[in-house]
Image (tube, helix red, strand yellow):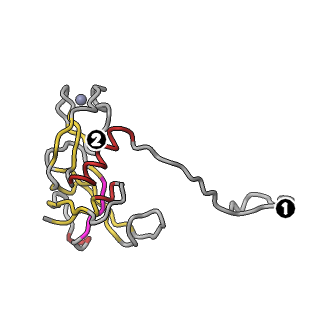
Amino acid sequence: MDKNFDTTDCYMIEGKLALPYTYFAGRVGSTFITTIRDRHKIMGVKCNACNKVFVPPRQTCERCLEDIRDNWVELGNTGEVVNFTVVRYDDKHLPRKAPFVMAMIQLDGADTPMVHILEGIDPERITIGLKVQAVFAAKTTNTILDIDHFEPV
Ligand SMILES: [Zn+2]
C-alpha cells in the first residue's frame, strides 16, 4: 500500500485476485509443443524470403512479414548459450526453486534464441558460447517444460 495514499475514511481489503483462464497456444505453438512431447524433437519455422529460422516458431516472419507457419524445419537438440541470468528469488510461478539459471539458448540451425533452464554447471563457470543440449522430461506437462532443462554437452 502506498504510504502517501490517505486511507483515513476508506474501508480497505487487501488481497490477490485469482483469474482462471484457458490459454490456446495457437496452431504453430501447439505443433511446437506436441512435437517436443511426442517425438522429443525441437522444430522451428523458416522464412523462405530471408532464410531466417525462428525458434520458438511463429506464424509470421518478424522481418519480412511473410506467412511462414507451414515451413517447418527440424533442429538438433544442441545449441549454445547466448545469454543467461541467475534467478535468486522464489516465486510459485517459477519452474525451479531459487537459485537457478535461465539462459537464452540458440539451437544449432536457428537464428533466434529460446529461453530455458540451464542445469548441470555452476553459474560461475557458464560462458557465452557454452555448448548445451536439451534434456527431455520423463513425464509430460504439455508445456515447454517437456524439455526439462538444458545441460552442457
Ligand atoms: Zn523473413
Q: Position of residue 9 (x, y in %)?
A: 86, 59
How dense is the environment of label 1, judged by Cα within 10 Å: few (below 14), some, or many (20 and up)? few
Label 1 residue SS: loop
Q: Closer to us: mark 1 or mark 2?
A: 2
Judging depth in this view, the residue of 81 and 148 nearest the camera is 148
The residue located at (31%, 26%) in the rendering is 65
The three-letter amino acid code for the residue at tag 2 is Pro
| Residue span colored magenta | 115-119
Q: In this picture, is 56 found above or below 98?
A: above
Residue bearing the label numbered 1: 8
- Which quarter shows the N terminus? bottom right
Whether the magenta-drawn stretch holds residue 118 is answered as: yes
SS under mark 2: loop
Q: Check mark 2 vs ligand 1: CB closer than 8 Å? yes or no.
A: no
Q: Pick whichever of labels 1 and 2 is earlier in the sequence.
A: 1
Q: Residue at x 14, y 51 (%)?
A: 76
Q: Is residue 121 left or right of residue 22?
A: left
Residue sitting at 25 percent across and 53 percent down? 38
Q: Could you say where residue 122 lies in the image, as x and y percent from the top left? A: 24, 74
Residue at coordinates 37% horizontally, 72% vertically from top-left?
A: 99
Q: Position of residue 105 (x, y in %)?
A: 23, 54
Toward the viewer: 137 or 38? Answer: 38
Q: Which residue is mark 2?
A: 57
Spatial separation of the CA atoms under disc 1 and disc 2: 53 Å
* Residue 91 lies in the magenta-colored region: no
Residue nearest the observer in this picture, 100 or 147 = 147
Compared with 30, 104 (above or below) is below
